[in-house]
Image (cartoon, coloured by chain):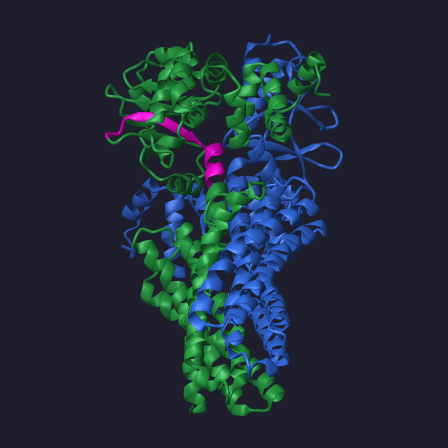
Chain colours: A blue, B green
Amino acid sequence: IENRQNDSLRSLMEEVHYADVAEIIDELHEDQATYLIKLLDSEKTSDVLTELDEDVREAILGNLSSQEIAGELAELDTDDAADIVAELPKEIVQEVISKISDREHARDIVDLLRYDENSAGGLMAKELVKVYDHWTVLTCVKEMRQQAENVTRVHSIYVVNDQGILIGRLSLKDLLTASTRSPIRDIYISHVDSVNVNEKPEEVARIMSKYDLEAIPVVDEIGRLVGRITIDDIVDVIREEADRDYQMAAGISQDVEADDSIWDLTRARLPWLFLGLIGGLGAAAIMGGFEEMIARHAILFFFTPLIAAMAGNVGVQSSAIIVQGLVNDDLKGSVGNRLIKEMLLALLNGVILAVGLLVFTWIWKGSFPTALAISISLIAVIVVAGVIGTFTPLFLHKRGIDPAIATGPFITTSNDIFGILIYFWIARFVLGI
Amino acid sequence: IENRQNDSLRSLMEEVHYADVAEIIDELHEDQATYLIKLLDSEKTSDVLTELDEDVREAILGNLSSQEIAGELAELDTDDAADIVAELPKEIVQEVISKISDREHARDIVDLLRYDENSAGGLMAKELVKVYDHWTVLTCVKEMRQQAENVTRVHSIYVVNDQGILIGRLSLKDLLTASTRSPIRDIYISHVDSVNVNEKPEEVARIMSKYDLEAIPVVDEIGRLVGRITIDDIVDVIREEADRDYQMAAGISQDVEADDSIWDLTRARLPWLFLGLIGGLGAAAIMGGFEEMIARHAILFFFTPLIAAMAGNVGVQSSAIIVQGLVNDDLKGSVGNRLIKEMLLALLNGVILAVGLLVFTWIWKGSFPTALAISISLIAVIVVAGVIGTFTPLFLHKRGIDPAIATGPFITTSNDIFGILIYFWIARFVLGI
């Protein structure tokens, strides 16, 4: 299909949604992709560009002239345009920006570049409908019609005062039913939710989904309206946050995908494996310290993987539940209560599992003291693992560190070591060695 | 504050957003909560009810009369009302429904009860703006004004034919600029995305976030428009799905929260711990089979936790990346290629780690053959663990089973066992025992 049948290709692509075109282009070779992008008009391709994989986009933009890139940016909302500009090589940014014919659009894009990507300011778009409180309804409707041209979908009309400070919002119904000469300050609704430009995206997501908002205005440090965030950007934030927590729990430290290069994947995975290696060497060292027990109770050694695995599993379970509670902001009560609860929970689980283990090992190996030593250790190890798993994320969270890092390999490894240590201590004590 | 100062309490609560009222009520005692709900008017409390924790809501509804519950339902959108009705005890459902004064609203709620909770039908609401293609613009505007009263926010105007089959949508702009006598069929846009009532919520979420939709119409098996799903419901679906996958990866099998009872938490956690116990016993049995090696090479046993931990970590890493690829639907290429890639990746990681281990163990224990045996085993174990971690979720997905189950304890446990088995085989071979 790819070679030269421009017209049929163009009309085919016109019918397809831009998200689907992006999927097709992700699969193509760089030259073919660039060819296709140049073939289609920029109203469509600009949307396609925002949906592409980052590396594909980078390759395609590298093949376009500054003029062509500026054409694409002109079609995009300011937030998407700013994201793309942020990815461009520094040398050409100025040239590209200077070629955007709509100067106001260009200014908005440059404004957005100032904000940290990981803040409300980095997420927001400049497109919004804004009216002054001293306007009359008539001026307001006239101005709005003009502003609305640049806004894909009007979610809310925001009301600001002379200083540009956000003071409320306007309902479309009130606007249409009010007399055309009444001033806006008589009819606007003075209550409006907003977020600060420096707010974390996760917090914005939490507020918007708690209050079921479809858009939220963003204000600067002194309350001036500077942009607005819509729910579709928030959906992306939620997905990314979930992906990151999930990867963290699995011991993957960067945002990678299955299709990334082996080298990227290695960089994301190796640090955690290295941590596991250190932990394993620690465990080996501990076991070396108990070497004298081997001669008499070799059977104890058979159960070290079991003890280590249980310690790891319990630790991950309890830390995951705490991390999730922190993310969803629904943890109540004090740290002390939580630790006591987890201890009771771990004790209950531990006793149930230990009884099973006791009976089984007793029958299998015929030595009650050994079976008892292993089972008692299991209970102790599970309780300690549960407490560590609960305490660590709470502690990290208090220190302002992302608690998600505490799940996965980190907890597993430290619990492995503690578990084995406790195991051999208790065994030595019970068996009176 | 709680006792009898009704007026001040009422005016205080009127100012607070319903999501915040719900948070306050979640903290109160059942009697106080019921008291507060009865105090406030049902326009507010109905929204509060939808935001409450399930068990708190159940307790409060138990204290309300059928008449009062019907009053709350009347204020809600049909999808939220249906969710609440589905939670009511069966005996009172009929009575409550019969007391809803708006019969059409009651009928819509009953219709929604028919649908599986875990489908597009279970998510959708009946509130939407629907016009027939044979109407003129004038009829259309008149009818729309009436329909829009029941719809909190108009996202789209859907066009259906005489049989009620969805055939397109209408842009507000086109409607306002067209002559009042032209029929709708001349001005509507015939392309519209829709989903089937039986579609899985996860798939609906994927479609809506891929195409950045804020609402999507739902059609039945023969294409008739039966409802619509809005983005705020989808945000909840995405959050729940992410929570579930995260918990699954951590070995928690039901949807529990940190504040649930110890008994609920035990039920969610114990099955996976039991699996770990069985795995540990399996590992113990395997090690028992290599007992004759202890006398001569006790050091080998010190490294079993290391080997088991590495097998587990690698398995979880590779399965997590595959599960995430499957969830986000961005895996490309064949299973074979993926396995080869993972094998290379694991080999690379394995060799790097094994070299470190070799040098360290050699220096520490002074025996090159032992260090070599352990290091070679590590490479083999990492490769096998990576392949199992990659293959298992792909296999489960093909069989139609949720691949998320394959991460966490399941992979860890099976990789522990395989890892230990491979380790002792290779050690025996290298050391020539």
Q: Is residue B175 left or right of residue A415?
A: left
The C terminus of chain A: image quadrant: bottom right
The answer to which of B57 and A117 lies nearer the viewer is B57
Identify the residue at image location x=53%, y=47%: A70
The vertical placement of A429 against A328, above or below, is below
The answer to which of A47 and B91 lies nearer the viewer is B91
Q: Is residue A183 magenta?
A: no
The answer to which of B184 and A342 lies nearer the viewer is A342
Which residues lie in the magenta part?
B222-238
Q: Is any part of residue A125 visible from this angle?
A: no
Residue B67 x %, y %: 47, 12
The answer to which of B226 and A18 lies nearer the viewer is B226
Residue B205 x %, y %: 42, 40
Identify the residue at image location x=42%, y=69%: B282
The vertical placement of B421 against A378, above or below, is below
Q: Is residue A164 left or right of residue B105?
A: right
Give residue B387's quadrant in the image.
bottom left
Give residue A173's quadrant in the image.
top right
Identify the residue at image location x=36%, y=14%: B137
The vertical placement of A262 against A88, above or below, is below
The N terminus of chain A: image quadrant: bottom left
Q: Is any part of residue B411 visible from this angle?
A: yes
Give residue A329's quadrant in the image.
top right
